[in-house]
Image (cartoon, helix red, strand yellow):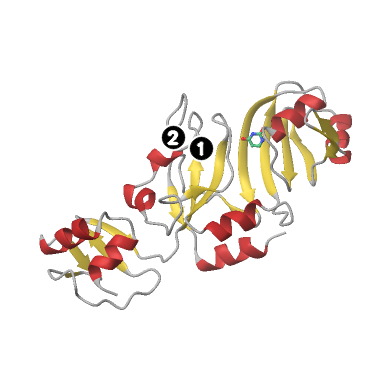
Amino acid sequence: MQLQEILYNQGFGTRRVCAGLVQQGWVAVEGDSMSDPATEVAVVEGLQFTVQGTTWEYHEKAYLLLYKPAGTECSQKPSTYPSIYTLLPSPLRLRPNKGAVQGVQAIGRLDQDTTGLLLLTDDGQFIHRMGSPKHHVPKVYDVTTKHPIDASQVDRLLVGVVLDDDPRPVRAAACEATGELQLRLTLTEGKYHQVKRMLAAVGNRVEALHRSRIGGLTLPDDLAPGQWRWLSAEQVDALRTAR
Ligand code: URA
């Protein structure tokens, strides 16, 4: 693939801008400085290239995880708080996507005050699969409650509670008190404000909410709130088949 095409696919701007970046000597591939935008490069996943001093990896499709900090909205057009998309470098937001929205999109949403693991991708099929009710990917939430948790609340969350918009009960796939005011809850569906509404239904209240796991994927220990990381091909495959 021509170098200018690689840069274009990866979100570095229009084809003209990308050609200009190479002509001005701002692009290197695997450490070699380039000057001709039409240079043919054998693309492989993870190919390293440098644009204006920043090193990038080539990914045909982008799959990443973000440690969502509190006080951010998962919307492209936030109403009150900054958008999570401002935490991502612009090429991830500008990657062209045939016929669809530009750039990576969050898979599902977390409330502005919720922290933790959020997946993003520009693969529409993957978003569809992960969001499908048939594909019950377990998601683990660590909840801090306002009132002490008692055993009957844990039981009711496991048996199922009725939320106001649907007569069918929703239940936690797993639920255990991990402290007087701490609960670990696993859900396999994703209704609006589901954890908060489930806790309210059993007479308690969420004070803080953190998503620590999706399928077999956890937040890396060395990732700080606001930071993101590419997912490996193995991690993406594991999520595709998680249930
Ligand atoms: N449930 C909630 O109530 N809020 C979230 O952000 C995620 C799950």
Callout 1 amino acid: Cys
Q: Residue at x 73, y 48 (%)?
A: 188
Q: Residue at x 19, y 75 (%)?
A: 39
Q: Residue at x 63, y 49 (%)?
A: 213
Residue 133 in picture, x, y percent from top left: 72, 51
- Residue under label 1, please give it: 74
Q: Is residue 201 left or right of residue 130?
A: right
Instruction: Tell which of 169 and 141 is nearer to you.
Output: 169
Residue 201 circle label: none
Task: Quarter of the image for the C terminus: give it.
Answer: bottom right
Mark 2 surroundings: few (<14), some (14-19) or many (≥20) residues within 10 A = some
Residue 43 in picture, x, y percent from top left: 34, 74
Whether residue 26 is visible, yes or no, is no
Residue 93 in picture, x, y percent from top left: 38, 48
Q: Residue furthest front?
A: 99
Quadrant housing residue 216: bottom right
Cα distance between the residues tagged 2 and 1: 6 Å
- Depicted 210 relative to depicted 4: above or below: above
Callout 2 amino acid: Ser
Q: Is residue 185 left or right of residue 66?
A: right
Task: Quarter of the image for the N terminus: give it.
Answer: bottom left
Instruction: Tell which of 41 and 95 is nearer to you.
Output: 95
- Depicted 33 relative to depicted 231: above or below: below
Quadrant housing residue 147: top right
Residue 15 in picture, x, y percent from top left: 24, 60
Mark 1 surroundings: few (<14), some (14-19) or many (≥20) residues within 10 A = many
Residue 83 circle label: 2
